[in-house]
Amino acid sequence: MADHNSVSSHESFVSVSSHESFIGSIDQGTTSTRFLIFNKDGEPVASHQVEFTQIYPQSGWHEHDPLEIIDSIEVCIEGAVKQFEEQGHSAREIKAVGLTNQRETTVVWDHETGEPLANAIVWTDTRNQALVRKLKARLGSDKLQGLCGLPLSTYPSVGKLLWLIENNGKVADAYARGKLSFGTIDSWVIYRLNGGPKKNLFVTDPTNASRSMFMNLYTLEYDEQLLDFFRFDMNKLHLPKIVRSSDRESFGTLTTGILEGVPITGVLGDQSAALVGQKGFTPGRAKNTYGTGCFLLYHVGDKPVISTHGLLSTVAYDFDGKPQYALEGSIAVAGSSIKFLQNNLGFIDSSTKVSQLAETVEDNGGVTFVTAFSGLFAPYWYDDARGTLFGITAYTQKGHIARATLEATCFQTKAILDAMEKDSGKKTR
């Protein structure tokens, strides 16, 4: 996810000679968007990053403006290419663009006009708790994870889409008229960058489709049993075509801006992209990414492993029609807990100062912080859990709470590592 501090000086990038080919990368994260330009050695030579609005209409609700996300991408492309050209390069040297994106976040739009029908519901959003409880009580709910790899929870896209159909008049009307398009962020971005309804390029890749609960993890196709369980009328709902993660044709080209005509040749959900970036190409390799949340992916090979210890089964990547799979441990709150100390409690004026605050005390002073702002994800899956501070006394200082906040991510990571070892029968490496 694009939750990192942007690089502000040209000196931070690798100096390269002209007449080379470069690759651009859109990193559309939960709190910010980046565009990076890489040389043939995979080294960044230019970058631009912007944060965008986080919308919290009610407790447990988290939304994004779909059009602002597109605007942020266009701003980042322009900014990075400008920096690139200031180094003596030409935009024509950028030969292809890839996309990585926050997953599960749900966007709905009018299939004919291409206009969004509501704000995107973000992956952290928990408004669909009551709906998910009803789904868990429905006959056949115990069979779902064996097909799609995900347990029923507030996390996957399906609950967000069902909530919108049931509670948003514009979405319900579009569904009734057969004009409702659903996509995760990758589908929305590809659709808009290709010109929206003019071209109507409507695709997704397996790493993103596997987060919806619509796709069969074995066939990489939409599954009738899954769709029937959720009682969708497929004459009324438009879903994106599932294509390989890397493809020269399927993702189209940018249709506007300084990189107009440049092909988009690859798409990966952000955590799969992190696994690939860490060269996790062989079974037994694992990575852990600390951003808004924390996500540990463990490469299990060319066959899915369905977890029996609270983990998710997901597609790691599909570059050549031979998909690779991963076990995933998802923690909803990691970096966002530091932002909570900064923005909500005023303990620090910058997230970079949390370690300094934690070091003002020797230990947590008996304080434990369960950072369940969006429920507890893996390996517990308690949708109705809430953030709780235990052990506060008159002795408690800000430093104790800061230390307990950092330790919360450590404890949850340890729980996921233990679950992975039980599921895989192997130590992670």
Image (cartoon, helix red, strand yellow):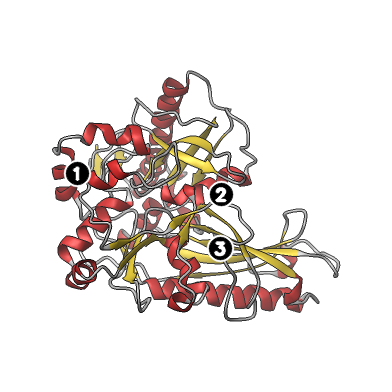
Going by the picture, which residue comes out furthest to the front?
235
Going by the picture, which residue comes out furthest to the bottom?
257
Can residue 350 be seen in this snapshot?
A: no
Along the line of sight, the residue nearer the viewer: 398 or 198? 198
Can residue 409 be seen in this snapshot?
A: yes
Q: Position of residue 76 (x, y in %)?
A: 57, 73
- In the picture, measured across the screen, residue 234 lies left or right of residue 220, that is left
Q: Which residue is mark 1?
A: 384
- Amino acid bearing label 2: Ala
- In the picture, measured across the screen, residue 81 lies left or right of residue 401, that is right
Q: Sequence-wise, which precedes: disc 2 or disc 1?
A: 2
- Amino acid bearing label 3: Phe
Q: Position of residue 318 (x, y in %)?
A: 56, 44
Q: Which residue is mark 3?
A: 251
Along the line of sight, the residue nearer the viewer: 329 or 201? 201
Q: Residues within 10 Å of mark 2 (few under 14, many from 20)?
A: many
Element on which disc 2 rests: helix
